[in-house]
Amino acid sequence: MATPLPSLAEFLRQNKQQFLQDLDAKNAEKWTVVMGNEAGDLDTIASSVAYSYLASKLQNTPTVALVQTRHTDLYLRKENLFALEFSNLDSTGADLLCIDDISDSHPLNTSFSKYVLVDHNTLEDAFEGGTGKVVGIIDHHADEGNYLDAAFREIEAAGSCTSLVARHFQNEWTVEAGVSPDVATLLLTGVTIDTGGLSDDDVVKPVDENSARFLYANSRLEQQGSFQGPESLEGLDKTLHDKKVDIGDLSTNDLLRRDYKDFETSNNLTVGLATVPLGLEAWSKRDKDLGKNFFDEVEAYFAAHNLSVLGILTTFKAPKKKRELLFLTNKDTVPADLEKNLFHGLEKRTFSPDNKTLDLKETDKLGKPNHPKHTRVWDQRNKEANRKVIAPLVKSLLEGQSAEAGGDS
């Protein structure tokens, strides 16, 4: 039997140290940088960290995971810190290579030669414009059609990107390979949190079920007995969910930035989308109890990020799963016809693969906003439509595509 590979923690510490030394010595050309998306959720971190280990150790390709969250912001996601500790990593995230570990003397767009993208499929703007080449993609978001010459482009529907990462390496990931069980454990936390422990029928795909079974058998959970589907993940799912909604100590600014992504439309509008695990009424009341005005706090975030449009996507249980949408537009940068197209299209447009709408019901549950003509609040009765669905829909509407049902999305 082959000599066991190093633990995940040992690998990350050594890998981080060697990569930063090579970067300072201008000798980083051999490295592939694997990155998840800017929101830095558990799916993104688990996918990138596990990919770096598996590519380095099973394929002999020096690969480092770069997390696009600052070390000082890791506290915003308690479920991430729990998953790291559960996988025998430092519970503060000290083992991770974060964006603030890269010194200003190494410009992000010129310091790296090769990229693999996981949990998104387009480089963030900060990394564009240099000589670095995207050599691979593993993602479960809408395909934006970039990097068609990459060595692999595995972009398909899945509840979790971690499921796709596990499948990518499954043929080489044998018992004889000696992979640390912490790798499978970390990936399994991603599958679990994104699929409700395989119990959310709206998002679970066969690849999630197959990968969960494989990962469980190679993880530390395997000691609890053979895999029994959702039943085997129930305890882990509850703990991850409880950590995710433990947000009582976070300000409105923190809630908006903890799971935030932005993008530019082809007509130069900056759009931000924040997913928040708290209902709007409870959130607004909490701000009021703290002597703050909810809309003032939201508009301060809006202004600080120079946004044209901000969408807040809430997802919570009360007691059943609920979703809401709150959209604000900048009256100075968003033409009236595009604003109308956005609001109308969110209510009427259908999207693939099932030709459904978001099934929105406008509500005044938050009272009168500061700029009511440019603000809309809805209950979203289509519970399966998350940011992966809403982001491309918003982009197409702001770029002027038809708002009517059946329009291209």
Image (cartoon, grey):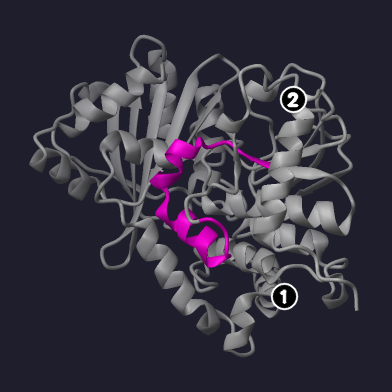
> Sequence-wise, which precedes: disc 1 or disc 2?
2
Farthest-out residue, bottom: 225
The quarter of the picture where the C terminus appears is top right
Comparing 189 with 357, the one in front is 189
Please tell me which residue is depicted at 63% across the width and 62% down the height of the picture: 187
Question: Taking 49 as reference, is 253 left or right?
Answer: left
Residue type highlighted by circle 2: Asp
Q: Is residue 102 above or below residue 79?
A: above
Estimate the x, y position of residue 223 in percent, counting from the top left. Answer: 61, 86
Please tell me which residue is depicted at 81% across the width and 61% down the height of the picture: 169
The residue where tag 1 is placed is 214
| Residue 74 included in the magenta stretch of the image | yes
Q: Is residue 169 above or below residue 349?
A: below
Q: Is residue 190 above or below residue 234?
A: above
Disc 2 residue crowd, few under 14, some 14–19, many 20+, Cα 10 Å: some
Estimate the x, y position of residue 380 in percent, counting from the top left. Answer: 36, 50
Estimate the x, y position of residue 310 in percent, counting from the top left. Answer: 39, 29
Question: Taking 302 as reference, is 79 left or right?
Answer: right
Whether residue 117 is visible: no
Q: Which is in the foreground here, disc 1 or disc 2?
A: 2
Estimate the x, y position of residue 227 in percent, counting from the top left. Answer: 63, 85
Q: Magenta region: which residues?
A: 65-90
